[in-house]
Image (cartoon, helix red, strand yellow):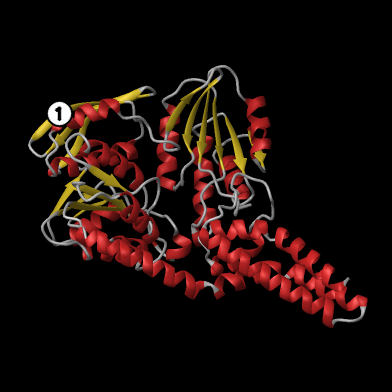
Amino acid sequence: MREAFAVLFSLFFFVASYPYAKNLQLSGYDAIFQLKHYFSQPYEFGGKNRLVFTKRVWRLTILHFLLLLGLNFLIFLLIQPFWGIIIAVVLELVILHFLLLFCSVLLLPVENCIKKSYIKKAKKILDGFRGVKIAITGSFGKSSTKNFLTQMLKSRFSVCCTPKNFNTPMGLCKTANENLKKDDDILVVEMGARKKGDIAELMTMLKPSYGILTAIGEQHLETFGSLEAVKNTKFELCEHMCTGGCVVFDRASENTNELFKKYRGEKKGCLRKGDFAYIESLKMSASGCKFKLHLGEKVVEIKTKVIGELILSDFVLAAAMAYLLGVDERSIARVALQLKPFPHRLQIIKTSLSTIIDDSYNSNPQGAEQALKALRLFKGKKIVVTPGFVEQGERQYELNYKFGKLIASSCDELVIMNKVNQTALFMGAKAGGMQEKHIHFAKNRQTQAEKLHRLQQKGSVVLFENDLPDNFK
């Protein structure tokens, strides 16, 4: 009988660990992050995200179940008094999350060995690749720049790029091992970073001769610690760049411009008048924009449905690199005509009732300000739905407070999602002049949908600015 109870309780605790496992996966299996944010993460089985049963998850869950099974057999077979079993079971429930983290830490040597084997295979493929390799990093705009550049280059070359937002060593491994072909002409790689050394690791794997540095700003301050640390880490792209190519810089970003001045290798500055590539005579509307694009000695008229000043900056950086690699200005203009906003990056979606501006991917202060400017281009009742910014360290309240003030001057109604920045956004919006009756709260998507159903009217414009995963309340 006791053995049966041990198995039943093991199964119960195993199922109860599902939200913890999901949150762990969403945080990139970062046990320290989990401990630091132990009380700020929701415990829920539903939500937007689901646990993805990768091979790593299977290894983790199997070890976790075996640990629970062994622990419960000890409890039910060795503890005799009933009250002792009750205390032990309650204690097990309390430490359930820590048991999962313990299993994750135990598996780290195994995971590192598996990671090294994937990296070794990918390095061999990358070292043997004879095409052009391009690295792209920055605080934001990496994915848009990569996607724009890939489309421009495809007008002339066979191109492989890292899919979606795969910007880690394992993302590069997956691209090299599964997607890269021997006869591809160009490989475009997006590089993300959360701490010092991340870009250096990717650069050592890729060994590119061309690079793009997009805008650098206040992103992932919690893990970096300071803006200076962010800049130093992004500069690792320049420090590990192979000779024979060129690095393109976004000089409209003061932080990136500092790195431009610091770099002594072959380089091209963009986005300031007189640079290698920049914009003039910009006219932007809700339906798109047109402008003159300067590329070296050439000038070309560009028309595109893409809106947003920062996204246009990404377009210019991509155009500069494509031009350097032999794509002429007329081909770039033709690609621009066909471009559409990428999913969740100032993507315009028309419905029978409203216009949706979906800017829900990975928000930051500069990008959010751009999104609010785009919102002002539209006519009709304006509604902003946002949870604010996360991972901003000590500046999180301040940045979200300022964002709330900007929102107040840009829209008619504000829906604040989640609890994490609720107070900062609310107080900021009030300080910006928004009345409390126009500030609303939603704890989940169902509540959000109910609020929007009541607030929308024919011709409304709804901006979705950022969307947090389930490991944030």
Classify residue 6 as left or right of residue 377. right
Classify residue 462 as left or right of residue 10. left
Q: Residue at x 83, y 68 (%)?
A: 4
Residue 399 place in picture, x, y as percent = 49, 51
- Looking at the image, is 282 positioned above or below residue 426? above
As shown in the figure, which amino acid type bears the numbered disc 1? Arg
Residue 319 place in picture, x, y as percent = 20, 39
Dot 1: element: helix
Residue underneath mark 1: 330
Q: Residue at x 57, y 61 (%)?
A: 58
Q: Is residue 138 visible?
A: no
Q: Quadrant of the N terminus?
A: bottom right
Q: Quadrant of residue 26?
A: bottom right
Foreground pick, 327 / 233: 327
Q: Residue at x 26, y 64 (%)?
A: 124
Residue 368 place in picture, x, y as percent = 44, 41
Q: Is residue 376 visible?
A: yes
Badge 1 crowding class, 10 Å Cα cut-off, few under 14, some 14 to 19, many 20 or more, is: few
Foreground pick, 423 / 58: 58
Residue 345 place in picture, x, y as percent = 42, 38
Classify residue 392 as left or right of residue 62. left
